[in-house]
Image (tube, rainbow, N blue to C red):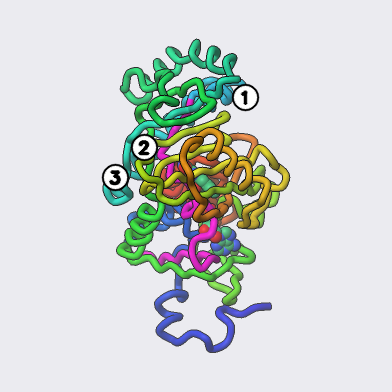
Amino acid sequence: MKTMLNGATFSYWERKHFFDSCDAIVIGAGIVGYSTALHFKRSNPNAKVLILERGLLPSGASSKNAGFACFGSPTELADDLQRFDVTTVWDTVALRLEGLRYLEEIIGGKNMDLQTNGSWDLIRKDENDIQREILEQLPDFNAALEKISGEKNVYSWDDQVNAKFGFQGVSGGFNNRLEGQIDTSKMNAVYYQRVIDAGISVLFGVSANTITSGVNEVVVDTNLGEIKAGKVAICTNGFAKQFLPEDDIAPARAQVLITNPIKSLPFEGTFHYQKGYYYFRNINGRVLLGGGRNLDFEGETTTDIATSDQIQSALHALLEEVILPETPFTIEHTWAGVMGVGDTKKPIVKELHHHVFCGVRLGGMGVAIGSLVGKQVAQMME
Ligand SMILES: Cc1cc2nc3c(=O)[nH]c(=O)nc-3n(C[C@H](O)[C@H](O)[C@H](O)COP(=O)(O)OP(=O)(O)OC[C@H]3O[C@@H](n4cnc5c(N)ncnc54)[C@H](O)[C@@H]3O)c2cc1C
């Protein structure tokens, strides 16, 4: 059996500062982990709170994502309305909108370069049926969104996208004038700073292996040895099966690429393509493009943060054929992140065992809802 913090690696000072008498341990330094720790500390100013992150940097989704500040594009909504009841669909949209406002409140729009340039849900020329169906539903979508946000005519059809943005093979796009984009690295940096400023410790390179809850404390077995705390929050999203073997949660890898800076890139905004299976945006004059999981769902059900030739080739082809058909470009960098998904789009927020809580399965919308989920987890820990 391992003992608390193997051997003599740590000094008295280090033990006292980081490990002794922890009130709460949060596992995972993503948006949810940071938000959980921050909210717990706000309600318990004298508490000792420790975040454990197994990566050298956070290694899930929060620092790998595309930075869309989005809450629902028409093709996704139409799809969801086929699968879920109408209240669930609009409650989810409302939660995302509330979550985005809350993220802005915590981080500050300017601090994360929030730009509300709008989004376009692009419709291909061979998708006439989809275009017609959604156009029919658009007044209902606008009415529902007005009820939630107070904003009129959020969605509209734009048939000028090829002319304005230089795309090819697209008949137009459903514009959402309220969606925006952030600089993901800035959001993470500010979150980290907020956490440190609050007096919370963050240790990178520490992996939680098992969690055992007792009557008064929880023991987290890590690669450093055992660390004890009054309460533990699991915020490991796509990696959470480890601690929630019975729950409906699976990893879903998502791959991304970024181009070289393109002279006079003709668009600013975020774009969804093929019911959101692909997504792209401008960032610092470059195109950031992700998606393609639908080409190999089985292969992408993995926690391995690697890219695959099949999906990267599809992304490359999409750039050449649709997004930048007339513009030479190079791919400067590719990467992947891991999301947590299940049969529904609702996150799992619950008390798992005595004194052990979780906020996981954030799907592809964690930028929007992650901060609120963290707040909920912290409230449960009270
Ligand atoms: C490529 C990509 C693009 C995306 N684009 C968008 C977007 O544009 N807009 C949007 O809203 N959402 C997007 N998402 C989804 C969004 O990023 C996630 O929903 C959100 O970041 C989840 O945050 P989290 O804190 O729950 O999880 P994560 O950020 O995954 O954090 C979990 C952390 O737990 C750590 N961890 C795991 N296991 C252990 C362990 N045993 N011990 C210690 N640490 C552990 C991991 O290393 C990780 O850092 C995207 C995701 C990806 C991958």
Q: Which mark is first along the chain, 3 or 2?
A: 3
Residue at (58, 35) in percent of width and height: 277
Marks 1 and 2 close (CB-CB < 8 Å): no
Side of 348 relative to 179 (left or right) = right
Front tag of 2 and 3: 2
Left or right of residue 174: residue 353: right
**Residue pictured at 59% horizontal, 76% vertical:** 225
Q: Main secondary structure of the magenta part?
A: loop
Mark 1 secondary-structure assignment: helix
- Residue 359 visible in rendering: no
Front in this rendered view, residue 246 or 159: 159
Q: Quadrant of residue 213?
A: bottom right
Disc marking residue 32: none
Is the CB of mark 1 within 8 Å of ligand 1? no
User: Of the residues shown, which amino acid type is indicated by label 1?
Assistant: Arg
Q: CA distance from mark 1 to mark 3?
A: 34 Å
State which quadrant residue 275 falls in. top right
Residue at x-position 43% and y-position 81%: 14
Pointer 2: what residue? 268
Whether pointer 2 and pointer 3 mark residues with C-beta atoms closer than 8 Å, the reply is: no
Label 1 vs 3, first from the N-terminus: 1
Q: Which residue has dot 3 on it?
A: 109
Stretch of the chain drawn in magenta: 46-73
